[in-house]
Image (tube, rainbow, N blue to C red):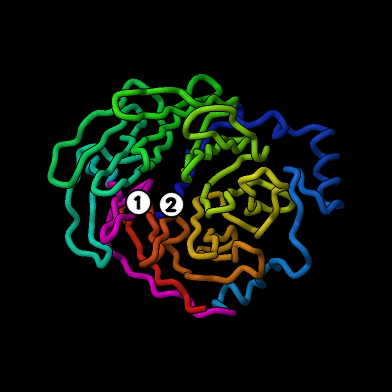
Amino acid sequence: MASSRESQAFPDWMRPWWRAPSALAVTLAWAALLSPVALVGCKRLPPAAPARLTAAQVETGAPTTLGRITTIARSSSRSLATADDSVFFGDTADNALLVVGKRGGPPTVVGRHAPLDIAVRGSEVLWIGIPGDAVYRTRLGHEPELVLSNGLFTAIAAGTSPDETFVTTIAGDGGSLVRIRGEEVATIGTFGYRPRDVVLDETDAFVLTDGELHGVPRAGGEQRLLVVGQNLTGIAQTDDFVFTTAEGMPSRVLLRLSKNGARPEQLAWDVRNGPIAAWDGWVYYLDARSPTLFRVPVVGGPPMPVARAPALGWATALAADATALYVAVDQVQKGMILAIEYPEG
């Protein structure tokens, strides 16, 4: 499973200092426009890498056939996660965590706390309840159990071998990464900016904050800074890379970051400030100019449209697995959970 949520909006005073307009900022912006090196210290891929699609291509869906979109549930949710044959999501109106089969059908209530973020580990589901002050876990058919409380929690990830749960929490203008292993609760990472999201691989947790992306060893140890950027949003990963989006010049960009700390690279432009996902050699993102879902090869190449629908303009979360790409839409009175078929090729 791979997923990403749309990060919460923060007021301008919480943004990194370089967002304040100044003569220095204007100078740096023009320098970025005239240089192949991005403000966030990235480089563009070689000329064979992505080119922007024209407006006509966005409207017609060229150069690929758009994937079929199916509504599998009707609910306004900020997050979702997939299991083998199920999709977990929230219902903010009913303040509940729900589950539905991937082919649709009547949803089942899992717990009475709508999720801010969700993680699945085998038959166990864990989530942060809105507004973010408590963490719960349960198995289908069982009563939810309170795991943590009295915090400002923002994201959750569940790992195996060993079974560990990782939660990001806000403290003042910064935050921390907490590891839960059995009855042990330990802080294993601290950050100067407020954390937004977290993903795991076998050895590390990757924590996205408003202005930085960090790699933190799951066992504890020295954390490493992968990138500094402006208003970072959305996180996804493959075996070798982590992906996020950042404000760039002249538009928001999709970044590919090597887990070994090599220089970041830009994969796509005109990216929406929202969730992303990665699966089977592709990174999926939302277009900033229209309600269109795009994908771009992990190795670089032209972006291609996957699906286009008005509802995608309100997408708040993406989850990709072997069956389909799943989208949570948080639109008042018109919320829905969508399943989008992958295009051929």
Q: Which residue is nearer to you in this view: 180 or 61?
A: 180
Residue that label 1 marks: 81
Please report contact status of discs 1 and 2: CB closer than 8 Å, yes or no: yes
Q: Position of residue 233 (x, y in %)?
A: 55, 44
Q: Position of residue 65 (x, y in %)?
A: 50, 80
Classed neighbour count for the residue bearing mark 2: other residues with Cα under 10 Å, few (<14), some (14–19), many (≥20):
many
Residue drawn where x is 14% and y is 37% of the image: 143
Quadrant of res 340: bottom left
Q: Position of residue 25 (x, y in %)?
A: 79, 36
Residue drawn where x is 65% and y is 70% of the image: 302
Taking the magenta stretch, the answer to whether it contains residue 76 is yes
Q: Which residue is nearer to you in this view: 57 or 1?
A: 1
Residue drawn where x is 34% and y is 27% of the image: 133
Query: What range of the chain is rendered magenta?
Result: 63-90
Residue that label 2 marks: 3
Question: Mark 1 or mark 2: which comes first in sequence?
Answer: 2
Kind of element beneath mark 1:
strand
Q: Amino acid at mark 1?
A: Ala
Q: Is residue 254 left or right of residue 291?
A: right
Quadrant of res 29: top right
Residue drawn where x is 52% and y is 34% of the image: 217
Q: Is residue 241 visible?
A: yes
17 in relation to 272, above or below: above
Kind of element beneath mark 2:
strand
344 in relation to 100, above or below: below
Q: Is residue 150 left or right of residue 13?
A: left
Q: Amino acid at mark 2?
A: Ser
